[in-house]
Image (spheres, coloured by chain):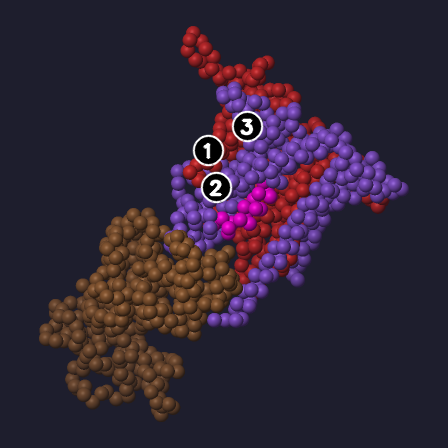
Amino acid sequence: MNNQSQVDTPPVPVAADPNAAYVRIANVTKRFGDFAAVDDVSLDIRRGEIFCLLGGSGSGKTTLLRMLAGFESPTSGTIHIDGEDMSAVPPYERPVNMMFQSYALFPHMSVEKNVAFGLEQEGVARGEIKRQVAEILDIVKMGSFGARKPHQLSGGQRQRVALARALVKRPKLLLLDEPLAALDKKLREHTQFELISIQQRLGVTFIVVTHDQEEAMTLGTRLGVMNHGRIAQVGSPSDIYESPANRFVADFIGSVNMFEGQVCEGSGDCLRIASAELGCTVRAERARASAAGATVWTAIRPEKINISRRPPATAPAAAPENLVRGTVREIAYMGDMSIYLVQIDSGKMLRVTLPNMTRGRDRPLTREESVWLSWHGTSPVVLTE
Amino acid sequence: MVAGIPILWLLVLFLIPFLIVFRISLSEVRLAIPPYTPLFTWHNGSPLLQLHWSSYAFLFTDSLYVSSYLYSLKVAAVSTLCCLLIGYPMAYAIARAAPASRSVLLMLIVLPFWTSFLLRVYAWIGLLKNNGVVNNVLLWLGVIHHPLVLLQTDFAVYIGIVYSYLPFMILPLYANLEKHDGALLEAAADLGARPMRAFLRITLPQSIAGILAGSLLVFIPAVGEYVIPTLLGRPDQLMIGRVLSDEFFENRDWPVASAVAILVLLLLVIPIMWFQRLERRELEAK
Amino acid sequence: MSSRGLFSRCALILGLVFLYLPILSMIIFSFNNSRLVTVWDAAHSPTLKWYVALAGNEPVLRAAWLSIRIALVASTGAVILGTLAGVALARFGAFRGRLLLAGMTTAPIVMPEVITGLSLLLLFVALQQLIGWPHGVGAVTITLSHITFCMAYVTVVVQSRLAGMDVSLEEAAMDLGARPGRVFVRITLPLILPAIASGWLLAFTLSWDDLVITQFVAGPASSTLPMVIFSKVRFGVTPDINALATILVSIVATGIAASTVWMRYQQRRRERDVLLAAAANL
């Protein structure tokens, strides 16, 4: 179905089979009237991993999260957590806790009481509650803030308390709804790594919902990209980036140059595609066999394209492959890299990024310069949908 | 369960009574306890439904009642308009005031409401009488030479209604105006619109919901007002609230009083439903 | 300041003058020695004699006491029913009878009082015939009537507050293991308490001040304060009414001023806390 090359990431400090489905979402659909917010989604989430649901607004990711928490019921399909069917289980009886996007800290209670709330519902003894609360507050580095009220805390502090409150019961599953959305950039980076370290320390399975690709790629051990209520692709961050399964994922994650073309030769270990849009033949080495004449799309990432003033020496003179000529139209200098918009003969614009490897580059590329664009045979991704 | 208790209470004590009023409007007055004819009589052993439409016929044909209805609608409409013309600028001023002053201003607007309604209307008697404060001041200033007849006039009723219902007009208007985005007016000014233009084209249309809510909140109860016309109004032209009360207490004619009530309800059912829809939309939009 | 701003500010000031003129005149004339209510007897005023007369006015005091007792019971009843209705409308989504409840809680707010009063009295009469209760009209029927029309106001206040409250707070509580009942008691209720309190005050004022409905459902034995005032006013204005009005206004003004001051103080403290937290940073 997808080109899924499974790269299993191991850091899971629990004994059981790391590949077993801890959370099994089977053919779950959620309709609101005629509108299907979640459309026949099936997912397996492994114990101890950080799984990121990535998608734009309206993709269904938040609805799916709420179904896991128990605030919405699937119209059809089932959800199993650690083998238990959650269909009839209300949110207050699920072994699931959630960190809300707005943090949802109880404004009339202190930090300590907020965190203790969940334990109180279980009937845990007073002394034991105090101990556990103190422990979790230390883990999130909010140990000395116990008596404060939420309005006396900054945004980042409130986020930690919300995290502590959701973790104190050591739930089987922790759901995080856009956990870093409200934080500023510097804080976000810092918190991302802290979240990972806390997760590894406690071994809780995380499911994170986010619209931010960077966040998903940093946090997630595996990602699920959602589009219009369906799963577009599931895989590790590098799988998703380097081997997108369809045009949506290729386009959604990062930037990409996409071309339509026809397969001329589909045998052996590589595919040859003739693309009028691109104005050359594409030789794709890591592609599945396809029937000759089939329409496909070729996706090439900007950083995988070489840009030079002369054609590369190894290029055959006649019928060049993976080589195209163009004119530099725009240059955006980003500090660590530069983005070049190059217009090729067909009129289409290619996006090429180059790291600024040397300081004060002599004879840097300028606008309206004529250049040659080339790429390695392993770079193109061939997509059929 | 949670919803059940209030629903039950209101069904019994609010909705069903209207049915009873309707049922009694279909009886005839009788010297008995209760003072109206029963719904069913027995005729050769089987029940016979007795409906008398005479009360309604009476109301439609007697010009006194027809004019009362029309007068009530007129007074309510004029008062609502005056309330709007006075209340809108006030609400606007409060919405544009500094946030710190707003709560104080609102408190000032609402404070009279918390004191006795009856007493405040009564105070206007003292102000509008022939030897009342207003006349005394005007006479003293030399503006007039004979006291103006201000009490027991339509004018006094308008003042009374506007005075009593002004907070009901201001609060919904303020709630609406407060939500307006000031940036819109700034954008309009930036694009060259003069303040009056910006007001008419941007602020006013956005405040329609508030205007409607406030107006209905004043108009509907004003139609059936009793206290204000009784204390301040003309003795020769009664509003329908007074008519109803007189029929009930003075004439002891329960059927006619009930018929009056039903007709008022019919007159007001559309405004009431309109108000309910506005309220619902307001509360559910949050 | 734009000309339009000036106009509305003038309107506001004039409007406030208009609102307070009658109140001020009553206060001033409550100290007037003359029996002629609006003629200032400069020679012998100001005087407290009307206040003294009021203190000894038995019917007025008895009526006031009755009004207070009825208002206390009615406002409490209205708050309980109104809160239930408000919670149902704000949190229960669609349920059978929702439209009916929504309609029945907005109609009493605008319904002319003569109609409500008449319908309630006829209900009590019909009930008496049917089941023998209530035995005539009086304090009980007045209280029941007041609860009925006051609860609508409480419903609107509570529903409005709940609609504006973040639902995720209640969801978070459920997520942490609290059943719906617990969620209501430990999370929702404390947060809507100010709304309930103002609903209670609103109901108290409406009940205490009500004339028309009370006139219909009161009997010869029970006279509430508004009824006493109304009959006094209809048959000739007496100056001790001014004294009564002044006392009422003072009580209300003090109450409102005190609560406003207290709320501003709370608000300032909160703002200071928020600033401190932001300054301290992470």
From the top left corner, tell me how far across and down residue A280 is, in percent: 20, 78
Are callouts 2 and 1 both on one chain?
Answer: no
**A269 to A62, vertically: above or below:** below
The N terminus of chain A, quarter of image: bottom left
Furthest-left residue in this view: A268
B26 left or right of A59?
A: right
Helix, strand or loop at mark 3: helix
Decide: is A245 above or below C111: below
Q: Which residue is mark 2?
A: C84
Q: Which mark is residue A181?
A: none
**Pointer 1 local density, CA inside 10 Å: few below 14, some 14–19, many at least 20:** few
- The part of the chain drawn in magenta is C188-203
Q: Residues within 10 Å of mark 2 (few under 14, many from 20)?
A: many
Residue A367 visible in the current orientation: yes
Give the colour in which the image draws chain C. Answer: purple
Residue at (46% x, 48% y) in the render: C185
Residue at mark 1: B8
Number of the label disc, if any, that sits on residue C119: 3
